[in-house]
Amino acid sequence: MSNSNDLGLLYLETARSKFIRTKALAERAIEQLDNAELVKAPAPGSNSVAITMKHIAGNQLSRWTDFLTTDGEKSWRHRDQEFEDAGWSRVEIMAHWEKGWAALFEALDGLTPDDLEKHITIRSEPLTVMWAIERQISHYAYHVGQIVYVARMLKGVDWETLSIARGSSGAYNDAMGHDTSEGAEP
């Protein structure tokens, strides 16, 4: 990379890739749940996968709509309601989820490297665009971790791992051509 414009493009591509991977990880967990499991809270006072999805989508719609021009906490957002069971069907939950991600990708795809140092606000707090993107990457990864963990708890022994299965690291490393022998260079 020879200049800041190239680095800016690389950053935007990397951020997009992180969002895509985060969304895909959540969806691989969500696919394992039946309709009853999707809306089941694993413990009193905790959130179901559906509620967490609803919150992520609500956040995305608020943060990414008019991303460069308005505060990321929109007056029309009712955050507390995102944590209430609205009795939505799986189809409604998934449609809302997709709507949130579509808002994110539309805004992200509209950015240029020159936008990264601009300032936006979230809850009246000024942030650079790059910092705001990083904030959202972390926020969504945090909640997707919750989705995966709740789904895993609900599925129990029927859970299909989303990464390297326990006891399979050596075979995975061998298949990938990684030398894990004693004394190998890290």
Image: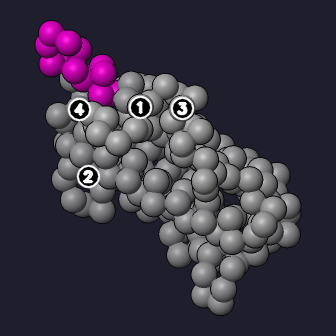
Residue shown at 15% from the left, 19% from the top:
4
Residue shown at 52% from the left, 60% from the top:
145
Residue 168 picture location, percent across and down: 61, 47
Query: Whole-Å distance between the Cαs marked 3 and 1?
Result: 7 Å
User: Which amino acid lies under the numbered mark 4 shown in the image of this protein?
Assistant: Leu
Q: Which residue is mark 2?
A: 121
Residue shown at 54% from the left, 42% from the top:
170
Q: Are marks 4 and 1 in contact (CB under 8 Å)?
A: no
Residue 121 picture location, percent across and down: 26, 52
* Dot 1 alpha-carbon crowd within 10 angstroms: few under 14, some 14 to 19, many 20 or more: few
Residue sitting at the far front: 182
Identify the image quadrant of residue 116. top left
| Magenta region | 1-12
Residue 11 picture location, percent across and down: 30, 28
Instruction: Assign the N terminus to one quadrant of the image.
Output: top left
Q: Which residue is mark 1?
A: 179
Q: Which residue is mark 4?
A: 116
Q: Which callout, 3 or 2, points to the residue nearer the camera?
A: 3
Q: Main secondary structure of the magenta part?
A: helix
Instruction: Assign the C terminus to one quadrant of the image.
Output: top left
Q: Which residue is mark 3?
A: 174
Q: Which callout, 2 or 1, points to the residue nearer the camera?
A: 1
Q: Are marks 3 and 2 in contact (CB under 8 Å)?
A: no
Residue shown at 41% from the left, 38% from the top:
180
Query: Whole-Å distance between the Cαs marked 4 and 1?
Result: 39 Å
Between disc 4 and disc 1, whose residue precedes? 4
Q: Which callout, 4 or 3, points to the residue nearer the camera?
A: 3
Circle 4: element type: helix
Circle 3: element type: helix
Question: Which residue is more in the foreground, 27 or 76?
Answer: 27
| Residue 119 visible to an observer of this rendering | yes
Q: Are marks 3 and 1 in contact (CB under 8 Å)?
A: no
